[in-house]
Image: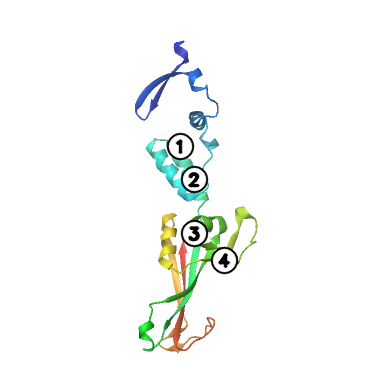
Amino acid sequence: MSGDVIDLNVGGCFYSAQQSTLQSVGGSRLAEWFKYLRNSKSALLPQTSAALDRLRIEAEYYKLPNLVSHIQETRKSLSSTITLSYRGHVPNGRENLADFRFRKITRILVSGKSSVCREVFGETLNESRAPDCGPEDNRYSNRYYLTHNTLELAFDKLLEAGFSLAGCCGETSTVSGTPRNKNMGDIDDSKSQFFHEFYFV
């Protein structure tokens, strides 16, 4: 009978139970944990970066180094890039200073892998301009845009999802009052137009 008794360490508390008791409920969470401990590669990990980060914290807390390394490998395979870009304008001269705004953004464009963009931006991502850009598991598009024009909110969403700014660039249609050759769309002499891109990884 003593060979059927198993000692368990649960959060620093020691328990003893019979093997038949532990196996009495099939498909239990405890059974799934034991299955993982037998073969860590059989663990079904979440496919979102935020859920993986939460699971990694728990695995570190419970001191499961194999699971931590498995999560890190999966996290690397899910790595992706997202590009935010926008065009806007500011007024020239001293006219209409009462209505002056630091910048006016017409639309924030989003480029990247569809599933990752959807995870980061949720319902604020408008996909109507790219309804069919290839198979869902490997779909990329540069035709998405956000339903709001708040750049800082978009940055916050990317930072919350674990992205970091890797680079940026900008372009303006005027330099010291001299028009550039690059045509950036409708030209209004009373406004300076600009275009910026931000690269997140």
Residue 107 placement (x, y as % from top left): 50, 72
| Picture residue at 38% right of the left edge, 82% below the top | 99
- As measured in the structure, the alpha-carbon distance from the residue carrying label 2 to the one carrying label 4 is 27 Å
Which three-letter amino acid code belongs to the residue tagged 4?
Asn
Mark 3–mark 4 CB contact (< 8 Å): no
What's the CA distance linking mark 2 and mark 3? Answer: 24 Å
Q: Where is residue 131 in the image (x, y as percent from the top left)?
A: 63, 62
* Residue behind mark 1: 66
Residue ID at (57%, 66%)? 142
Q: Which of marks 3 and 4 is nearer the N terminus?
A: 3
Reading the image, the residue beneath label 3 is 121
- Residue 112's place in the image compared with 43, above or below, is below
Measure the alpha-carbon separation of dots 3 and 4. 15 Å
Specify the amino acid type for callout 3: Phe
Of marks 4 and 1, which one's residue comes earlier in the chain? 1
Residue labelled with disc 4: 142
- Measured in 3D between alpha carbons, the distance from the residue under mark 1 to the one under mark 2, in whole angstroms, is 11 Å
In the drawing, what numbered circle is on residue 107? none
Q: Residue furthest front?
A: 98
Q: Residue at position x 45%, y 37% from top?
A: 66
* Residue in view at x 42 percent, y 38 percent: 59
> Sequence-wise, which precedes: disc 1 or disc 2?
1
- Secondary structure beneath label 4: strand
- Which residue was labeled with disc 2? 73
Q: Quadrant of residue 114?
A: bottom right
**SS for tag 1?**
helix
Disc nearest the viewer among 2 and 4: 4
Q: Which amino acid type is shown beneath numbered disc 1?
A: Asn
